[in-house]
Structures are given as C-alpha cells and as structure tokens.
Amino acid sequence: MPFFIIGSVLLPLNWRIICTRVVAVFNLLLLWNAIYRIRLLTGMIQLFRTLGLGENPSFQLSDWLNKPMIHFLGSIFLPFLFLVPTIRHSQWASLLMHFFVLSYFVWTSQDAIQIFVAIGYVVSLFAATFSSLWLLKKLPFQNIQSNG
C-alpha cells in the first residue's frame, strides 16, 4: 500500500492517477474496517456485561491502557479522520495512517488455501469498493476531462 502512495507523487501522470485512485479506495476500506472493529468491540462489551465481568470493583483503567490497546483504539478511531476533506486528500496523512494501521496486523496463517482465500476476499472487496466509488463519481481525477 505505501508503494501506491509514493507512486501517486513520483510517477508520471497516467500512473499517478491510478495510484491516487487506489489510495482513495484503501482509505475508504480503512474506514469500513474501523466501523467493523467498533461493532466487534461493542459485541465484546455486551458479552462481558452478560457474563458479569464488567462489574469488577478492582478494575483499574491502567490495567487496560497498554501499548497494544492504545494501538487498537488508534486503529479504530484514526481512520475517521479521512472524513475531513483536507486529510482525505493528503498523501502524507494516508502514508502515516497506513503505516500505523498495517503495523497492527500480523499474518498468522501459514496454510496456502487460507492465504489464497484471504487474497481473493481482499481483491473482491477492493473491486466492489472501487466500482462503487467510480459509479458515485467520488474517485480522484474523475472529473478531469481528457483532451484526447
């Protein structure tokens, strides 16, 4: 992903347009991932409350605020900054956000079938998101008329 962000700055115009569109789609996918994580987090909170684990009198906030938890919460809430137009159109903000979020993910599967299924899932999700943005005319450079 960072290669597309760097390519959107350094490559010739035709490739820059493609890279910028790919970055825009991945930024939207980060936002959808954040919404999905919020849903998972609320489900876990509901489960803890149902089991009675959330009402512990010895609960300390410092027990939960460690580096992985802060990183998890940052990967949930920071993608919502892409709703602000000035941040959404900044390649530097995209680069920093993708490095931050991608450093959280760890590839845990070594099974070849699961790897190909995951790649197929990501490609189909990317294609659906790209086509939705294209149909809604929300992709960068989509309003520029070609002189050809």
Image (cartoon, rainbow, N blue to C red):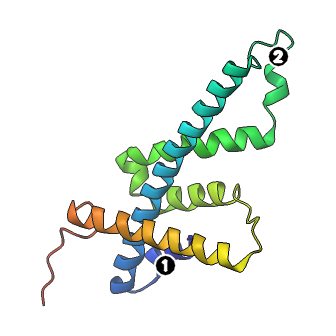
Query: Dot 2: what SS?
Result: loop
In percent of width and height, residue 122 lies at: 51, 68
Ranked by sequence position, the earlier of labels 2 and 1 is 1
Residue 31 visible at all:
yes
Residue farthest along the top direction in this orientation: 57
In percent of width and height, residue 106 lies at: 74, 61
Taking the image as shown, residue 60 lies to the left or right of residue 92, namely right
Query: Dot 1: what SS?
Result: helix
Q: Residue at x 59, y 57 (%)?
A: 96
**Looking at the picture, does residue 101 appear above or below residue 111?**
above
Q: Quadrant of residue 18?
A: bottom left
Kindly report which numbered mark, 2 or 1, lies closer to the viewer in this rendering: 2
Q: Which residue is mark 2?
A: 59
In percent of width and height, residue 46 lies at: 62, 25
User: What's the amino acid at mark 1?
Assistant: Gly
Q: Which residue is mark 1?
A: 7
